[in-house]
Amino acid sequence: MKWMKLGLRLWIGISTLIGFLLGWILLAHSGSPAAASAKTAGSAVRISAVLPALQPVPSLDDLAGGAQVQSVQPLQPLPASPRITGNAPRLRTSGS
Amino acid sequence: MQYDEFRAMNTDILLMAKGDSVSLAEGFRAARTYIAICEKRFTRFSEQSELSQLNRASGGWFLASQDLFDVVRQARRYMDQTCGLFDPSILVALRNAGYDRSMDEMRTDGAGMDSALTAGSWSLAGFDAVQFIPLICGIHLPEGVQIDLGGIAKGWIVERVAHLLASYAQACAVNAGGDMFLLGQPDDEETWPISLEDPRDPAQVLAVLRVRQGALATSSITKRRWVQGKRVQHHIIDPRSGEPADTDWLSVTVIADHATEAEVFAKALLIAGSAQAQVLAAQAPGIAFIGVKQDGSLWGSANSQEFLDVSGQTV
């Protein structure tokens, strides 16, 4: 029993010492608070960098000269409107 | 059919709805309140609006409401789809042209000129470089970019109001100065009749359109005009020049599924002119458009004819 108690104390002591030393090494190799804040700013930049890059806006002239124009239907002259009798509809296009 | 007419967002609002009177009265009240809230958020004429706060934050990240985020994101998408002819960052050019306060105020006091801005100082503002973080509704406007969401926000509000009003009605239509959204069937008819105004004389009707459901918007260079110095200016700015658009259309009406799409393409087609209209319209295959030229003649996409009422019947 006495040997068991001694062994347990020894094991706890060595574990504590090893844990302390590991913690010390870990902290010694981590960045300083200033470096940490700089890293945060850096990661903010990285957030911007990972945002999906938008494609440049195409030009209407490019489209007009491209193949897509072939699928475009010609502009239609619309028939002259018949004379409207009675009240015109209350909903009006107006325009802005 | 019951009506509620009032003025908001510097334009005439018409709410039309079919249903129980008590319920409709409540619906009209709710619609008015919602419009007032949205107007406060999206107006560029108030320093306190969320849009003005976003403009002041240009160059940095701004945490926006879901609504503002949604509209700005749609604006960026439409910028691509219209090949840059829709660009909300024409705000500086609008001010250059003298449109520096609401049209109601300009009609009373006349146009102004921002002394810090001079004609010819225009360069493409760079809205194409805007960035978004959807998770937090973050918007990053590039340094110096200022945006005006006037038209697209109006379309967005109109569609939202129509859906709100529809929860109190069997059918409804919302019209904000020509930006419309239609839901359900009106009295005894399958379609909503709509007068296509003559942009040369708004008292005259050029044609009657018949639309089942969805959105319709009209952009015109004859509606918001003012004199700056000796020049007659209008509010449709061509982003390529920073000047009021030089176009052979007087007005363009677009029928689409969504009000923002109708509003944006009406404006872009007006700026593009008739020569490039088909190419541009091909970017949004679902839309139909009708343009009015200087002589009052009507031109449109092949699918626009199905919306024209050729009967000339009375309403």
Image (tube, helix red, strand yellow):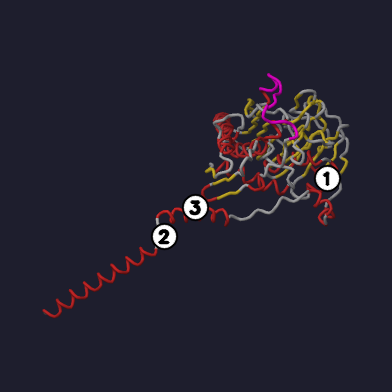
In front of the other: B140 or B186: B140
Q: Rounded to the nearest whole Å, what is the CA distance between mark 2 and mark 3?
A: 14 Å
Q: Is residue B112 magenta?
A: yes
Outermost residue on the top side: it is B108
> Label 3 near label 2: C-beta < 8 Å?
no
Taking the spot 58% from the left edge, 29% from the top edge, the residue there is B46
Instruction: Identify the amino acid type marked 1.
Output: Gln
- Checking the image for residue A31, the label placed there is 2
| Badge 1 element | helix
Residue B218, percent across and down?
A: 74, 36
B216 to the left or right of A81: left
Tell me the chief SS of the magenta region: loop
Quadrant (top left/top right/bottom left/bottom right) for the N terminus of chain B: top right
- Checking the image for residue A76, the label placed there is none
Q: Chain of mark 2?
A: A
Q: Which residue is mark 3?
A: A41
Q: Chain of mark 1?
A: B
The boundaries of the magenta stretch are: B105-120
Instruction: Identify the amino acid type marked 3.
Output: Ala
Q: Quadrant of residue B261?
A: top right
Instruction: Identify the amino acid type marked 2.
Output: Gly
Q: Nearer the viewer, mark 1 or mark 2?
A: 2
| Badge 3 element | helix
| Badge 2 element | loop
Quadrant (top left/top right/bottom left/bottom right) for the C terminus of chain B: top right
